Image: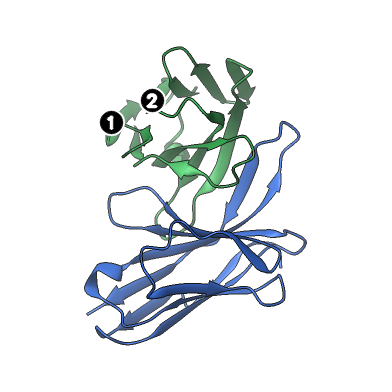
Chain colours: A green, B blue
């Protein structure tokens, strides 16, 4: 039972354009959502999070949008840079539950 | 140390052997997690420690897998009678909460286990 889904295994975007990565979830008890970025041979690194009481959180070039009614969130990266090429994981956790549930990831390739 | 340290970075073993993977978390982080990532998948939860005790071990796939954290710092993941299906990258993370309350895990680089 995949509670966090990333339906696009890969995405290619031109440098300077906007990258939009999508994530859907099924568990309505999830209270926090996080995005992680992973380079080869490294562990995932935290990018940005959003609480379920908000619908948007912004940090520099990264913005996460949450649509609770649709159980959908997205990560926007603008402008996209070559260093953004990596695998991006969406993750979720429930209030009082300390473990993160991850999606399967989307490989983002930024084309110079 | 500054980050989460995992050793060994690579381990190749034969089917049926015993393996230990070590994790040294960020100093001061009381929570420690083990995840497993197979090819093409996201990290899959195995076990979580709060201090010395396992607060949630619901992700351990079977009784061949065991983890300890005897002094509340370093943790060891132990796999007995390894099988080829155990081949994966084993990730350790420790955590601290953000101001918003999100539980942000900081991951190590992982230990890649290959069972021949």
Q: Residue A91: x and y, percent?
A: 48, 38
**In the displayed structure, would residue B46 be above or below residue B21?**
above
Q: Which residue is mark 2?
A: A22
Quarter of the figure with residue B25: bottom right
State the residue at coordinates (26%, 85%): B14
Q: In which quadrant is the C terminus of chain A drawn?
A: top left
**In the displayed structure, would residue A67 be above or below residue A59?**
above
Q: Residue B109: x and y, percent?
A: 50, 62
Label 1 and label 2 in one chain:
yes
Mark identifier at residue A57: none
Nearest the camera: A20 or B111?
B111
Q: Residue B75: x and y, percent?
A: 60, 73
Number of marks in the rendered image: 2
The local secondary structure at tag 2 comes to strand
**In the displayed structure, would residue B20 be above or below residue B106?**
below
Determine the residue located farthest toward the top in the rendered image: A69
State the residue at coordinates (27%, 77%): B115
**In the displayed structure, would residue B7 be above or below residue A79?**
below
The local secondary structure at tag 1 comes to loop
Q: Is residue B102 left or right of residue B76?
A: right
Q: Which residue is mark 1?
A: A8
Q: Is residue B93 left or right of residue B116?
A: right
Q: Residue B90: x and y, percent?
A: 43, 65
Nearest the camera: A5 or B68?
B68
Quarter of the figure with residue A40: bottom left
Chain at tag 2: A
> How many angstroms separate mark 1 from mark 2 (CA)?
8 Å
Chain at tag 1: A
Q: Are marks 1 and 2 in contact (CB under 8 Å)?
A: yes
Dot 1 crowding, Cα within 10 Å, few <14, some 14–19, many 20+: some
């Amino acid at each position: 039972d995949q509670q966090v889904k990333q339906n696009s295994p890969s995405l290619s975007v031109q440098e300077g354009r906007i990258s939009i990565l999508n994530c859907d979830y099924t568990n309505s008890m999830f209270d926090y959502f996080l995005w992680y970025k992973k380079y080869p041979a490294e562990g995932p690194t935290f990018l940005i999070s959003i609480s379920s009481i908000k619908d948007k959180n912004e940090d520099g070039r990264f913005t996460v949008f949450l649509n609770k009614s649709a159980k959908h969130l997205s990560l926007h990266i603008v402008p996209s840079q070559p260093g953004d090429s990596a695998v991006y994981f969406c993750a979720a956790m429930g209030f009082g539950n300390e473990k993160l549930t991850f999606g399967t990831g989307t490989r983002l390739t930024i084309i110079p | 140390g500054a980050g989460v340290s995992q050793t060994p970075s690579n381990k190749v073993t034969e089917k049926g052997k015993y393996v230990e993977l070590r994790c040294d978390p960020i100093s001061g982080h009381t929570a420690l997690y083990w995840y497993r990532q197979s090819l093409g998948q996201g990290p899959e939860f195995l076990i979580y420690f709060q201090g010395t005790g396992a607060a949630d071990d619901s992700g351990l796939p079977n009784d061949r897998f065991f983890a300890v954290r005897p002094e509340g710092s370093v943790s060891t993941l132990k796999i007995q009678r390894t099988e080829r299906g155990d081949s994966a990258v084993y990730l350790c993370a420790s955590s601290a909460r953000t101001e918003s309350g999100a539980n942000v895990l900081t991951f190590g680089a992982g230990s890649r286990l290959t069972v021949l």
